[in-house]
Image: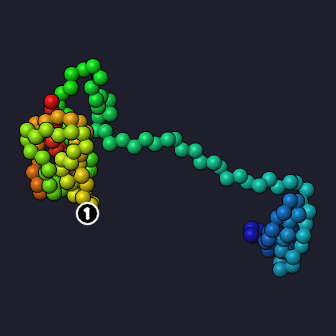
Amino acid sequence: MKKFKFTIQGNKYDVNVVNVEDNIAEIEVNGATYKVEVDKVIAQSKTPKLVRSVAVPTTDSVPSQQKTSAPGAPKGAGYVKSPLPGVILNIHVREGETVKVGAKLITLEAMKMENNINADKDGIIKTIKVKSGDSVLEGDVLIEIGD
């Protein structure tokens, strides 16, 4: 409801627009209700449509670096990095041990939940960069897997 105050030839009027349908407006003038016809067609205001660009989340610190080697290229060492900040609970492998893709390497506690960190490639555990109880940040290298 919209409220207006008019002064016409020195007389003051309090006007409330109660309802508008098509070109008929129901108004209240100083307490009395009237239905009036509006000559102009009142266009309904349209709510603007919000358009957002597509946001692609990334956890890459340097997204321009190639993540994998080309299929014909020699395979080198691979680094298993922490996916989120947390504390190392258990290390399930030893240096020199052979692992397959999907093998459980480390249990990481993050946000009061235990997360298993698995091998993403076949190979031999070259170095283990952390020990149980260590705090790690997202992206920290935990284990190096080589051929």
Location of residue 90 in the rendering, given as x and y in whole percent from the top left corner:
14, 55
Q: Quadrant of residue 145?
A: top left
Observer-nearest residue: 13 or 110? 110
Location of residue 43 in the rendering, given as x and y in whole percent from the top left corner:
80, 53
- Residue at point 77% right, 55% down? 44
- Residue at point 84% right, 63% down? 21
Q: Is residue 119 visible?
A: yes
Location of residue 77 in the rendering, given as x and y in whole percent from the top left corner:
17, 31
Which residue has dot 1 on it? 112
Q: Give the amino acid type for the residue marked by disc 1 in the picture.
A: Lys
Q: Left or right of 76: which side holds 9? A: right
How many numbered marks does the figure carry? Answer: 1
Quadrant the N terminus occupies: bottom right
- Residue at point 21% right, 48% down? 104
Quadrant the C terminus occupies: top left
Location of residue 54 in the rendering, given as x and y in whole percent from the top left corner:
49, 41
Vertical comparison of 75 with 81: above or below: above
Secondary structure found at label 1 = loop
